[in-house]
Image (tube, rainbow, N blue to C red):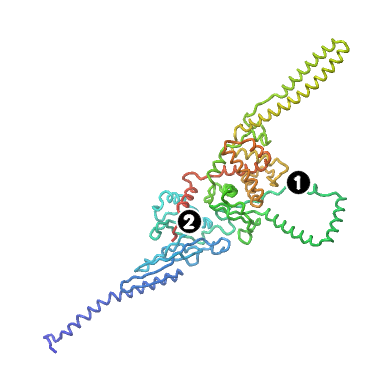
Amino acid sequence: MSSTNSGYSATDIITFIGVPLAVLGVLPILYNTVATLAALSKIKRMLRHSRLTALTRSDVVNRVIEVELPRYAVTPCDRFAETELYWRPSRQPSSIPGGSWTTFNWQARAIGAKTQRVEYADQLRQPQVEVAFDKLVAYLLDLGAVPDAHGWKLLRSTGLWTPTGCSLMKSPNGFHEALTIAPLDDSDGHLSLKANWSSDWTTRDFSSLPPYWIRLPPALLPDPVEADAMHTKGKPSTSQQEIQVDDAENGLKKDEQSLSNKQSLDSIQKQADKVTRSPIICQISVDGLISAMSQEDGALFSSANLETLYIEPLRIRPGKTDGVWFASVATAYGTTSQTILWNYKIPDEILNFARRDTVPCGVLVLLGVVDESQTPEWATNYDTREEERELFFRRSADQRAAMTAEARMPLPQRENAARERMHRETNQRMQDMRDRSRLESQRREARMSEALQSPKWDTKLVAEHNLRWLRERKESSTGFCVGGDPSLALRDVVGMLLHRMVLDGQFASSIFRMLDLWKAWADNGGMRRSDREALQKDQEIFALASLLVALVRDTVTAHEGTLSLDLQECLGMWKTVRLG
């Protein structure tokens, strides 16, 4: 082997130079491997701490980590069946960016997966979830969150260009943000939101009435004195009682099965009376009434204390207006100046009908609801007494003239003239009676025509007079008792009326028919004679229907620029949002 003056061979020189270079070439790979494994370990630890199931793959050469996470569509837990999960925040919310939705407990369904390629653990993002915007807002309101008027107004005006971090919902004390605008990185064109909540912020519980629900008070029971009078009226005499007792004893011996049937009927009647005396809670959605439940008076709002009621006739169905009328009145009943969120939109045609003046005041006079002195002058006044006085004077003058002429006659002619005069006076009296009857009939018809053409009153004024008329009535053909308490407002009476309509389908149908009739004549140029006859036939039903229309008219509608309108417009603009 050859050598040099330095004493190192060529092989040694290559070894001295090549080995360090080789080591330097492997170091980046080793570093990438260690860094990738460390980042992968941290990512797995983050996923495990957040209780997320994910597929992870790593490329140690290129220092890339792939994480495949599922994407979910979520909805709030059932308020009745999952009470604990509904009111309690999640025990271990995710700390990964984009996972703020894990603050709450949800009913989740996987709708796909998202793969991310990251280099560092802090680049990992949890996929946002899809949730119905109205359900999310209703859930936060149910927990006690307070809408931020400025945020909703800004969202309505700027849309997706709303600044990140803009607050839409705040905690009950107003110091913390519960729902804010999030970055659009993972929204795919949807509105992106971020949630935040603490168990200390929850100010409501399962006993509170949730959004979109209304509570209807039970109707007033008849006066005990009247009930006793009715009972006494139907009670037989002593002799009749003895005969009935004997017949009952004979019947009991013949058929013992009737006793068990009676007990069964009594049990059913007691259950029906219990429902009649209990409040009813109704859920109103965009499709009208969707559920109604009877709640025992004083019981908590939970599934254990609720009894589902039959509401099929009150649902919105094609070709029928019953469900539309009920949903509109129920929405008007549940909408007050404090109402922030509602679901059903009263049709414009019903709102326009309720705001128009459609009932002639003269018809109310003919029905006995209003005194004519309370209305503008609309009918022709006839001085009947003066006409009768003039006729009496004229007939008396004719009689005196005839008797004077008779006095100058000889006796035989006087007797004949007296008989003729008496016969003539009798015919005149009969003719006067016929003329008076015909004149009264003509004036009655004219008064009817004038009543139909009289000035029209708005539904608010009509309802006030009808409510007073209902209170003054001692008997009710429908069995609905308004009561004589003047402190009972129109809205309270409507609540009791809706309660009765839920339980009595026939009663509700009669009111809906009257409302359809009323709206028909309002849309077709005014009331006709047949409409007036229908009102007179079912005057109490018309009076009750006027209370419903008046409440719709007085509904506190949202004006431009208010929080309620901004919120409703935003909910209609974005049906589904991304939460994360």
Q: Decide which of 365, 300 is in the foreground and name it.
A: 365
Circle 2 — which element? helix
From where the camera sits, is residue 276 visible? yes
Q: Decide which of 392, 467 is in the foreground and name it.
A: 392
Indicate left or right for 410 with 86 as reference: right
Circle 1 — which element? helix
On screen, 434 above or below 252?
A: above
| Quadrant including the N terminus | bottom left
- In the picture of the structure, the residue carrying the numbered disc 1 is 226
The residue sitting at the bottom extreme is 1
Image location (x, y in percent) of residue 446? 66, 29
On screen, 307 above or below 419?
A: below
On screen, 301 above or below 465?
A: below
Other-residue count near label 2 (Cα within 10 Å), few / some / many at <14 / 14–19 / ≥20: many
Q: Decide which of 506, 576 is in the foreground and name it.
A: 506
Q: Residue at x 28, y 74 (%)?
A: 28
Kind of residue indicated by mark 2: Phe
- In the picture of the structure, the residue carrying the numbered disc 2 is 133
Q: Which mark sits nearer the N-terminus, 1 or 2?
A: 2
Q: CA distance from mark 1 to mark 2?
A: 53 Å
Mark linked to residue 38? none
Image location (x, y in percent) of residue 185? 38, 60
Kind of residue indicated by mark 1: Glu
Indicate left or right for 481 with 166 as reference: right
Image location (x, y in percent) of residue 367? 68, 36
Other-residue count near label 1 (Cα within 10 Å), few / some / many at <14 / 14–19 / ≥20: few
From where the camera sits, is residue 333 visible? no
Image location (x, y in percent) of residue 363? 64, 35
Q: Residue at x 61, y 61 (%)?
A: 303
| Quadrant including the C terminus | bottom left
On screen, 58 above or below 221?
A: below
